Image (cartoon, grey):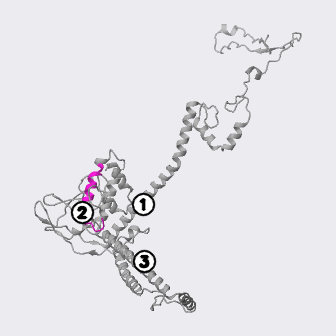
Amino acid sequence: MDVVVLAQSVLDCPDEAVLQLLSLAPELPVVTIETSVADARRNYIRLAGILHPDKLKNRFEKATEVFQKLVRAFEKVADPKYRKTLQAQKAKEEKQKNKRKTVEGGVKKAKPKQLVEVAARGTTHTSTLQKQEAVKKIIPQRTKPIVEDDFVLRDDEGDMSSDKDEDTNGEDTADSDAGNEDFMFLASAVPPSVSTNRALIGTPRVGGIYNRTVVRCPQCRTSWEPDSKQHYTLFMGPAGKKVHCETCLCRFGCATALHACPNCQRGFDYDVTMYDTEVKCGSCKKAFGFPYYPVNQHLIDLVGLEEWRERAEREKAVERTQRAARRRAGESDAQDELHTLVGTCIVEEQCPICKKAVVSRHRQHVEACLKISPADRKASQSKPSRSGGPGKPTLKPSVSKSSISKKAPTTSGSAKKAPTKRVVKPVKKAGKKRPRRGSSDSNSEEEEEEEEPSFEETSSDDDD
């Protein structure tokens, strides 16, 4: 199977179809509810080795998203609460299916017997049925028949079995409700409630053989360190807390994380059912356990609220992607047609719609032509143009500049020019400076010259 096709198949699987997703592993059996966690882990490891982002990132654009979805699917399958929920749902569906089969089988058996009795009785069957119908109109029918008539077969055993099934179904629904209690918030639109109880649960289990194991990211193998001791308990225990890798931002849980022995660093498989047990390392043959730091109900409920928020954000992202895909699918044809028309208009310098010459702004012209209805466009093209044809552009008649500019008025030769008056303006000349009082006698004897005005002739009009 092609790797790209396999990755696309993983993306196409719904979030709740985790068994179908793990069943995509090549050359491995299908994963069902009865499949053990160890067998399901083989399918997960096979798919993780094929679809790892380091191998797939150059061939598939959403390689990281594929690997994250695979990790999320195996975390669900390895969770005992989720497996219990699936088993309860399957048992309920099987009982309902068996109930339908028994009802259909009883009806099929009743028909031949009824026909034989009717043939033996003859016409008395019709009269008897008419009497029974008249009695039914007067007396209300009972919900459960207790007497078997001659002509109508009543399956009392089926009714008794249905009563028993109803009782057992009531017990099953109670059990399934108890099993679904932990996972009911995953499918709810309302966030789960968070308890305010801060009382610690249990006694601490630390020291001796109980040492924290080495935990690594399944994608980049970076070591993970808890923020607090209680954080380690929430991650490794039944609370099922998920964490993000600080290097690659992969979100994983205890089932998909890579665990190693605290003594020899040898890797081993882990799931939440092993939290309260002791494990013997296959390499160093030493036994070790997992420490427990007491937590309260408030912290456990916060883990459920975090899971609910993460699921809600993922569903919203999927809805946005689907809406965008629908919009692109509707607009793709129109956009392709527009690009084709604009390209034709640019190459031919003629609009392919209205057949007019277009030198610039080709896109604006094509968009404007598309907005016009075909009837209006046909009517505008049918009008006669000066150029003589609808296909040729209409040109305005050119007007010479000489016809637009006004000619200067001409005067006859006999007309005489009017004489221009000459205006004489007085112009003052700068006189000599007066001598100071303390000047010499020769300067005092000089007579002061009077300032005589000089005249300058100016004409109002220039001579031709």
Question: Can residue 260 be seen at all in this image of the molecule?
Answer: yes
- Helix, strand or loop: magenta stretch: helix
Per the model, the C-alpha gap separating discs 3 and 2 is 38 Å
Q: Quadrant of residue 214 in the image?
A: bottom left
The numbered disc on residue 179 is none
Per the model, the C-alpha gap separating discs 1 and 3 is 41 Å
Residue 8: % across, % down: 37, 52
- Please tell me which residue is depicted at 37% across the width and 67% down the height of the picture: 305
Q: For the residue labelled by badge 3, is the local secondary structure a helix, a strand or a loop?
A: helix
Q: Residue furthest left?
A: 285
- Please say if 249 is above or below 378: below
The C terminus appears in which quarter of the rendering?
Answer: top right
- Please tell me which residue is depicted at 42% across the width and 79% down the height of the picture: 103
Q: Earlier in the sequence, mark 3 or mark 2?
A: 2
Q: Amino acid at mark 2?
A: Asp
Q: Residues within 10 Å of mark 3 (few under 14, many from 20)?
A: few
Q: Amino acid at mark 3?
A: Glu
Q: Which residues are magenta?
A: 32-53
Residue 304: % across, % down: 35, 68
Question: Can residue 195 be seen at all in this image of the molecule?
Answer: no
Residue 276: % across, % down: 20, 71
Mark toward the viewer: 2 or 1: 2
Q: Say which residue label 2 marks.
A: 39
Residue 243 is left or right of residue 433, and the answer is left
Q: Earlier in the sequence, mark 1 or mark 3?
A: 3
Q: Say which residue label 3 marks.
A: 104
- Please say if 268 is above or below 398: below
Q: Say which residue label 1 marks.
A: 315
Q: Residue furthest right?
A: 414
Residue 31 is left or right of residue 147, and the answer is left
Per the model, the C-alpha gap separating discs 2 and 1 is 29 Å
